[in-house]
Image (cartoon, coloured by chain):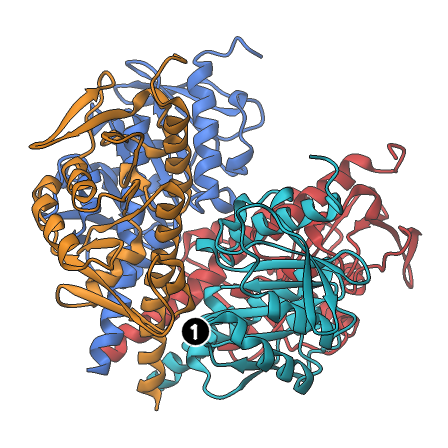
Chain colours: A red, B cyan, C orange, D blue
């Protein structure tokens, strides 16, 4: 089936799924990837399948329309990702976004367990510089939404916080994971690696500092 | 030896063993895999050998019979898995099960060390949705058996708790590991990844929460 | 150079070095591997080189003799492993041993930091069954030696504890690592995986249990 | 493009970048690698790109000159590493250095979070012997600089501490990472592995010891 539209980009999505699975961001069918292929069309990985086994022919193509999106291409026997409404809202609110990654990384989930409230602020890590628009001395705030039973019910709140936190490239969802984006797939992947590093470091620093200060 | 019965399924079992070894679920000859190949026949990995080195010809074929099972094919110089009686009882109690994974994952063992009693309940993780029949807001309970000296002596208790906890796709064995199943190999692998993620998160959350609350 | 003696066993040693490096047991030129190739000859990996890069031609061949050993084959520009005297003493005290692995695993080192005294006893882990002669309900004791400046000065104390602890397949060296053996390379590798799993679980259990009991 | 100068060394730098990315030292475009190719010329990896994707043609060649360095070869559309001034100062202060690695390893960053002051001293680890000039019973001191907003502003302070700590093969930068060198690429890689092992062990030992002593 070499006549699939957007074949190189399809292969890229499959390759990214394999890499994110290997990092533990997409185990147990969790997580997802989407990339923009032209002005109004987007590739989206299917739902509920082993992400590391996805092939080019398994991807959905959607087109953004005023009242949401329509499915342009639907692979047989597959369901579109439960995150599609969320992806669509992020693409609509941030016209420059070219790719979105949804990760179930344990680091992202544990961070939302130990931070109360609707956001987390991270500062004092060189790795912040890997996030577009951030620097070392400033601080960086990422919104946290509470999880809901049906992922699609998060779409409106995601749209809201994406507006409310214009400097963030991510939305955390408590007990669930994180959505991370960038202006193209490279930048989305770099952001995802930086955020996961920062989440891991944040948790470990908190644990170490608490243990050491207990001792003193 | 291309005339082995069920060759593609044999290769699948070998491939799964390699993948589970890489995840740390089958180090030191630990762990095991079994899949159903037709109405009454099942493939089972051998005992006491390096799981990542198993080849197609090394697998046992068993047939379920009323009073237990009989060995249909026995590879030379190999012993059938010590878990066979357990696998057989799970297949008999859950007619829909198509594959079973036995893992020695350190996460599963540590969880049984810090949880007293005969079950553990996990809730408030999106990853629960990867388990068939589970959702985010509900809670999910997995039975825990105490370990015994000879693995085959666990078979009856496994049969009991499989009946007692109809919503669980797993049985934990204290100080030992976990048996996880699904209606086919894909679902068993997805369940195994979800459970291991949940066990790891459960332990880390407990550790973090205790440390933070000590400080306060 | 296809006329090297013991070529398949040489390739095996190189392959094991790559695998142990990947596990973190041989980073920074640390660790080592030796296997018996016939009644009196043994292959030994060289010292002070990147273990994951070793090739067949880089291995030493030694022969055990009454007063120690003699080098049968010495690769150009390479130094024999600093552990050679230790390997030789283990081979002499345990006639059945066919392979020895020296690991710098952080788990093994941290265990010797938190356990005082000259031995550690591990019990209540199914993984103990992977060690020849061990079972689940019994307990298993591994000697711990204090480290010395020159590795060769450990050889006599290793010989002593190998005699004193006939059921152990390993000697821990404080702040340093562990020597692990088996009757052939498969068994040595299985023992190494089981011990490393047990060391990791021992440390994590201790940490978790202390944190939880502080809270209560 | 097979007529690039220093092609084998270029491929080596690309290969090292892939390996360091896999270790988590160069995620999110972080980290960097430089090697000397002759008396006055050096290869340097570019800035702000995915390190694991770098190809031979993407590397800069610089020449050391009295007042700093000049760029001999500049790949199109790429920026030279932000660490270049630091690399240059290390090469100038340590004439014997043949390769430098910059790592964002979380271990290195967490260590600088829990150690106050301008240096850390590590002792009692066999792994110290992997560092040239170090031994087990002695102690080894590594300078720690505070991070600054622009990496190039670290260059002078790096030059100072490289002089002040002649036995160290590394400079830690708080909240940021570490620069590690050796007389050739093999030795720089070995040093990087040893330091990262020591940083990880240092943090874990501190955590374990604090928890255990709290209990007593």
Q: Position of residue B91 (x, y in %)?
A: 71, 70
Figure quadrant of the C terminus of chain D? bottom left
Figure quadrant of the N terminus of chain D? top right
Give the total number of marks visible in the rendering. Answer: 1
Q: Residues within 10 Å of mark 1 (few under 14, many from 20)?
A: few
Above-or-below relation of A212 to C169: below
Q: Nearer the viewer, residue D146 or C45?
A: C45
Q: Residue at x 57, y 45 (%)?
A: B76
- Left or right of B106 on screen, residue B125: right
Q: Which residue is mark 1?
A: B149
Q: Nearer the viewer, residue D169 or C67?
A: C67
Q: Nearer the viewer, residue B87 or D127?
A: B87
Helix or strand or loop: what does disc 1 sit on? Answer: loop
Q: Position of residue C76 (x, y in %)?
A: 23, 16
- Left or right of D33 on screen, residue C34: left
- Left or right of D107 on screen, residue A118: right
Q: Residue at x 18, y 35 (%)?
A: C84
Q: Looking at the image, can residue C62 be seen? A: yes
Q: Residue at x 36, y 32 (%)?
A: C13
Q: Looking at the image, can residue A177 be seen? A: no
Q: Position of residue C156 (x, y in %)?
A: 8, 46
Above-or-below relation of C49 to D123: above
Asked where in the image residue A67 lies, by quadrant, the reply is: bottom right
Above-or-below relation of D176 to A206: above
Q: Position of residue C144 (x, y in %)?
A: 17, 59
| Residue farthest toward the top in the current orientation of the protein | D3
Which chain hosts label 1? B
């Amino acid at each position: 089936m070499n006549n699939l539209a957007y074949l190189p980009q399809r292969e890229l999505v499959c390759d990214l799924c394999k890499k994110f699975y290997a990092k533990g961001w997409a185990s147990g069918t969790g997580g997802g990837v989407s990339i923009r292929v032209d002005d109004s069309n987007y590739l989206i990985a299917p739902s509920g399948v082993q992400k590391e086994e996805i092939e080019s022919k398994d991807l959905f193509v959607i087109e953004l329309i005023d009242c949401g999106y329509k499915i342009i291409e639907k692979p047989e026997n597959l369901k579109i990702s439960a995150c599609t409404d969320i992806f669509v809202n992020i693409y609509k609110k941030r016209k420059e976004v070219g790719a979105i990654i949804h990760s179930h990384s344990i680091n992202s989930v544990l961070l939302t367990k130990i931070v109360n409230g609707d956001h987390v602020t991270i500062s004092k890590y060189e790795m912040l510089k890997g996030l577009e628009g951030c620097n070392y001395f400033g601080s960086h705030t990422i919104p946290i939404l509470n999880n809901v039973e049906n992922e699609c019910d998060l779409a409106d709140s995601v749209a809201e916080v994406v507006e409310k936190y214009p400097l963030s490239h991510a939305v955390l969802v408590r007990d669930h994971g994180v959505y991370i984006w960038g202006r193209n797939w490279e930048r989305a992947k770099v952001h995802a690696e930086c955020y996961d590093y920062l989440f891991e470091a944040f948790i470990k620093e908190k644990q170490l500092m608490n243990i050491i200060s207990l001792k003193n």
